[in-house]
Amino acid sequence: MGAMLTQNTAWTNAAAALARLREAGVRLPSDVIALPQRRLAAFVRSSGYFNQKAKKLKVIAALFAGRTALGRSAAPSREALLSEWGIGPETADSILLYAFHVPVFVVDAYTRRILSRVGLIEDGSSYEEIQGLFHGSLRHRAPLFNEYHALIVRHAKMHCRARPVCAGCPVQPCRWREFADA
């Protein structure tokens, strides 16, 4: 649910929605399916786009409930996830990495921002091109991808913000800093 709720919002907003769902006893796909959509939307209001996200949660809950009914506990394929309404590459990869420990690197806005500023990607680079940099450079291990992504998020929140905080930033070279220092 977190992968869906964090779309287009800060994790703190998604976490607040998840906490409300937990407090209400909504933990399993069957719980999401049983909940009236308007009530589900009220629980996830803090995550923004709450009506759309309630619909998306219903879709993903149905997918996982169906898999459970068939006795499937293994990860769904990336293609199966991408074929569902409301699931794009970042959400699919987040589900695979964080819920099923499949070694796939998650590319998010933080990753794009940092790689662009250090000159590793150009604006307009595709998700697959960016992901390929990590898949081609790192061993394909879920804990490594998880940790690497967490470090990118941490760095982006500390230094490489939309308005960067360059003081104390360990990343060199950085196009933004070079531009700002000029």
Image (cartoon, rainbow, N blue to C red):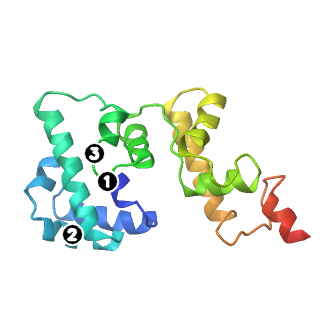
Instruction: Name the residue at 25% across, 56% down.
Output: 56
Label 2: which secondary element: helix
Q: Could you tell which of marks 1 and 2 lies nearer the N-terminus? A: 2
Residue occupied by mark 1: 86
- CA separation, marks 3 and 2? 19 Å
Q: Could you tell me residue 104's position as x and y percent?
A: 48, 35
- CA separation, marks 1 and 3? 6 Å
Q: Could you tell which of marks 3 and 2 lies nearer the N-terminus? A: 2
- Disc ID at residue 73: none
User: Which quarter of the rendered picture does the C terminus lie within?
Assistant: bottom right
Q: Could you tell me residue 23's position as x and y percent?
A: 21, 64
Label 1: which secondary element: loop
Q: Please identify the quarter of the rendering in which residue 16 is found.
A: bottom left
Q: Please identify the quarter of the rendering in which residue 177 is found.
A: bottom right
Q: Which is closer to the viewer, label 3 or label 2?
A: 3
- Disc ID at residue 41: 2
Q: Please identify the quarter of the rendering in which residue 100 is found.
A: top left
Q: Which is closer to the viewer, label 1 or label 2?
A: 1
User: How busy is the neighbourhood of tag 3: few (under 14 within 10 Å), some, or many (20 plus)?
Assistant: some
Q: Could you tell me residue 57's position as x and y percent?
A: 23, 55
User: How busy is the neighbourhood of tag 2: few (under 14 within 10 Å), some, or many (20 plus)?
Assistant: many
Left of 39 or right of it: where is 139?
right
- CA separation, marks 1 and 2? 15 Å
Q: Amino acid at mark 1?
A: Gly
Residue occupied by mark 3: 84
**Along the viewing direction, whichever of 132 and 47 lies nearer the viewer:** 132
Work out whether 74 lies above or below 39: above
Instruction: Name the residue at 16% across, 64% down.
Output: 24
Q: Are marks 1 and 3 in contact (CB under 8 Å)?
A: yes
